[in-house]
Image: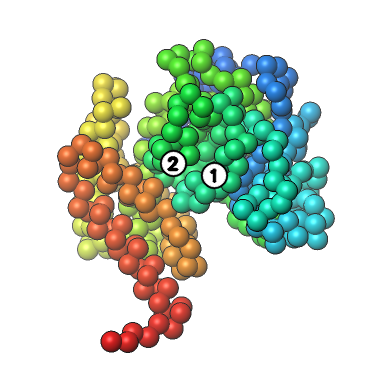
Amino acid sequence: MQRSILSSYTFDSGHFFVALRKLGGRPFSSCAARHEQNHGQGRASGEGIASTRIHILGIGSIGKLIAHSLKGIPSSPPVTLVLHKPYLADLWERQGQKIVIKTGRDRHAKTGFEVELVGRMTQPRSSRTIHHLVVTTKAHATIPAIAAVRDRLRPESTILLLQSGMGLLEEINEKLFPDPETRPNYMLGAITHVVFPLGAFQAVHTGFGTTALCMLSKGPSTEHWAPASRYLMSTLTRIPVLAAVGFPELNLKQLQLERLAVNAVIYPLTVMFNCYNGDLLHNFAISNVMHLLISEISLILRSLPELRGLPNVNNRFSPNRLRELVLAVASTMSQNVSSMLRDVKAGRETEIDYINGYIAKRARELGLECGMNDMVIQMVKGKQQLLARQREDYVAFQ
């Protein structure tokens, strides 16, 4: 049965792909397909690498989906779940040491995982080298999570980052791996599957999407791609459920920037107005705010030096096209609550610093105005503080 394009679309992870198709865009280009075909050979052989074991850091909905999917392929690699909290290790034992993914009426359980508990209180600490690390934590939790296993990563290791927002890689290098000679290799990814948690080790897969991946080279050419990166790319692209494909770096970056622009409008505005995505539509006052925010974002993205000289950049990131993307997303997912609004209501930290914060940072580097983005950043953080005080029954004393 052919899947509806809307069923593979999620506002919270790569949600702009449906809007791109509605506008005639091509999320996966032919050059991306050739990139994966040419450099994804030796799929499961593990030739030239020290270990085929894959560590999953972050056992949220996406982490569970990836771990479960890895165990569903022939000759599956060994998979280790890296946990930071002792109670999760206890739950793992009590719940039968399995990950369960529900799809429709079917429930599929996978076993055979190894579990490691990491953190300052963990004794004894493992010294086993991590060769392939897939990180699915929230952006603001990623650096402390990687820091807990930093001493087990080597220059030949590969880290795959699967987060919303941008700017995280630079921060990881600055805080964790400042020496280019000793830092690990990196891969970036964007995943569009719709997955919701049902428990610590259970999730429901409600929408089948795609996974865009990119290997970053330490050298000037693709010949410098690390064996660990090639192995991780080839392993993930042979998992039917993930529908993963490789992208050249600049292609993936443009997709990430489109996604970032949409998130930077819908996420903070749904927090400010405490509303569903669709409530942003057909409201003259909110439309004016969206127009101002989109215009500022468009100018900043079109001014980025790494995009200079690329064909069609001015049209791709024009105010009109970004506005059409935002409206298409808000309309398609009109009854959804954005993940940022869910985080604010639950008292969790948001990813605003890696969404609008990234845009504002790039604007300052270029000497451009970013007042609208600065404003929504402070409004989201202010809303968080107000709700935190209400939850704590805050009383002010003079």
Q: Residue at x 46, y 45 (%)?
A: 164
- Residue in front for this viewpoint, 331 or 224: 224
Q: Would residue 396 appear left or right of 223 to someone viewing this image? A: left
Say whether marks 1 and 2 touch (CB < 8 Å): yes
- Residue in front for this viewpoint, 15 or 83: 83
Q: Would residue 324 appear left or right of 124 to someone viewing this image? A: left
116 up-or-down from 129: above or below:
below
Q: Residue at x 27, y 46 (%)?
A: 360
**What's the mark number on residue 147?**
1
Q: Is residue 211 visible?
A: no
Query: Of label 1 and label 2, which has the lower sequence position?
Result: 1
- Residue in front for this viewpoint, 35 or 146: 146
- Residue in front for this viewpoint, 397 or 4: 397
Task: Give residue 80's position: percent from left, percent from top.
Answer: 71, 41
Label 1 crowd bin: few (<14), some (14–19), many (20+), radius 10 Å: some
87 up-or-down from 16: above or below:
below
The amino acid on which the numbered mark 2 sits, given as a three-letter code, is Lys
The C terminus - image quarter: bottom left
Q: Residue at x 44, y 41 (%)?
A: 175
**What's the mark number on residue 137?**
none
Task: Give residue 284's position: percent from left, percent from top.
Answer: 23, 62
Please, which residue is most extreme toward the front here?
124
Q: Would residue 213 appear left or right of 318 to someone viewing this image? A: right
Mark 1 to mark 2: distance in Å? 9 Å
Q: Is residue 333 visible?
A: yes
340 up-or-down from 367: above or below:
below
Task: Give residue 169's position: percent from left, percent from top.
Answer: 44, 37
The N terminus - image quarter: top right
The residue that label 2 is drawn on is 175
For numbered disc 1, what is the local secondary structure? helix
Q: Residue at x 68, y 21 (%)?
A: 49
Q: Would residue 249 appear left or right of 52 to someone viewing this image? A: left
